[in-house]
Amino acid sequence: MSPLASWARRHPHTADAVRLTLSLVLLALVTFEGVVLARQPSLPHAAVWISGILVCLSAAPWPAVPLLARAWFAAAVTWTVTLLLIFGNHPLVVWGGGEAIALLVLLSQVLLRAPARTAAVLGPLLGLGCMAVPVRDTDPGRFTLLFSVLTVVVGAYSLLLRLQSVQRVRDLDAVRTAERLELARELHDLVAHHVTGIVVEARAARFTRVSAERAAEIFGRIETAGDEALGSMRRLVKILRESGEHPPGGGSPGTAPVAGLADIRTLTDRFSATGPPVALYVEEGLGDRLPGDVAATAHRIVLEALTNTAKHAATATAVRVGLRTVPAGLEVRIADDGGRPARLSETARGGGYGLVGMAERAEALGGSLTAGPSPEGGWQVTAVLPF
C-alpha cells in the first residue's frame, strides 16, 4: 500500500475533505475559463467546458470508482474533444488549463499505481493529451511549451517514485525470505535436539534395568519430545512451502537448542548494562509449557525490539518487557518511554526492515505482530504467538 493510501485509510474524514477540495479547485478553474474568459458563447467553448468538467471529475480520487476506469474515461474524453476542435473550429482564448492540470494528476497516479503494461499505454495517452490541450486554442503560444515541460517533469518524477517503490518491495521480499530461512534453520535445530533426546532416553531404557514406574516416566518424556518435534517439523514444512526455498545446507545439524525463553533474561541484563534499565516480567511456569520454536521466536522478537530501542530511542529512561499467556497464545510486549534516536550513520541505522522480519516470524507461526506509539508515550511492540 502506498503512503498516500495508508494515510487516507487512517484519516478517512480528512481524505474526503481533500478529495472534495481538489474537485472544487479543478472545477473552479474550468468554470473560470468557460464563463469568465469566454468572449462569446460558441459550440467549441461549450465542448471545452464540458470536457474540462468531465476530466476534472475523473481526476478526483473517489474510492468508489477505480483509478483505471477514471483515467481511461478522461483520456477518451480529452482526445475526442481535442481531435474535434483541431480538425474543426478552434475556440478563442480558452484552451482548458484546469483540464490539463487534471490530466497531470491522473498521469501521476497511473504511473505510480497502474500495472506496468497498462501504465505503458495509458500513461503516454494522458501525457500527450495534456500536451495537446493547449493546441486547441487558435494561439496556444507558450502554454504548449509550459505543459509539455510539466508533463515531462511529472512523468519522470512519478516513474522515479515507482522504481523506488518496486525496489522497496524487492527489499521487503528479501528480508522476509531471509527471516523464513533463519527460522527454518532454528526449527531444524530444535527437531534435531528433540530427536537426540529421544535417542538418548531410548538407549538408556534399553541398556539399563528400570522399574515399571521409571519406564513409564521415560516413555512419557519420549512421547513429549516426539510431539514437539513433529509440531516443529510441520511448521518448518509450512514455512518452506510458503517461501519456495530450502533451509541452508552445509554442516551437520546442531544438537543444542537455539536461544529461547531462558536466554531473554541474559539478553535484558546485557541491554541494561549499556542502555536504559529493562524491567522483565515472565509469567510463572511459562518456560515449562512453551514449545521451543515459540520460545526462539519470542527471543528473536525481544532482541530486535531492544535493538530498535537502542537505535531510535537511545535516551529512553525505562524499557518494559513482558511475556504472559493469553487466550490466543503467548503475548510478548516490549515498550519504552520514548526518547531521541542515537547518532548513527545510515549504514548503522539500517534500512527499516526490522519490524518486517519480526512480523514475518510471528506470521510464520500463525501469530501476529503490531508496533506503534504506546498510550503512555514512547513505542510499543506486541506479538501474539499461538502454541
Image (tube, rainbow, N blue to C red):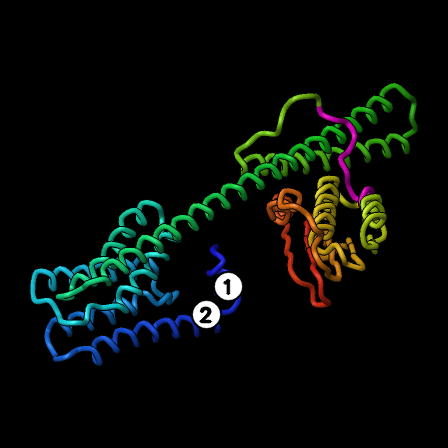
Q: Foreground residue, 320 or 126?
A: 126
Residue visible at 38% across and 49% down in the picture: 159
Q: Position of residue 227 (x, y in %)?
A: 72, 36
Task: Determine if the magenta segment contains residue 312.
Answer: no
Quadrant hosting residue 256: top right
Quadrant hosting residue 86: bottom left
- Give residue 15's mark: 2
Q: Are marks 1 and 2 in contact (CB under 8 Å)?
A: yes
**Which residues make up the magenta segment?**
253-264
Q: Is residue 281 visible?
A: no
136 sits left or right of 357 in the view: left
Query: Callout 1: few (<14), some (14-19), or many (20+) C-alpha neighbours within 10 Å?
Result: few
Q: Foreground residue, 183 or 33?
A: 33
Q: Foreground residue, 191 or 29?
A: 29
Q: Residue furthest left?
A: 88
Q: Position of residue 150 (x, y in %)?
A: 32, 58
At mark 1, the secondary structure is helix
Mark 2 residue type: Ala
Residue visible at 90% across and 31% down in the picture: 214
Q: Position of residue 369 (x, y in %)?
A: 64, 53
63 sits left or right of 328 in the view: left
Which residue, given by chain and number where applicable, does mark 1 sit on? 7
Mark 1 residue type: Trp
In the image, residue 121 above or below residue 245: below
Residue visible at 53% across and 66% down in the picture: 10
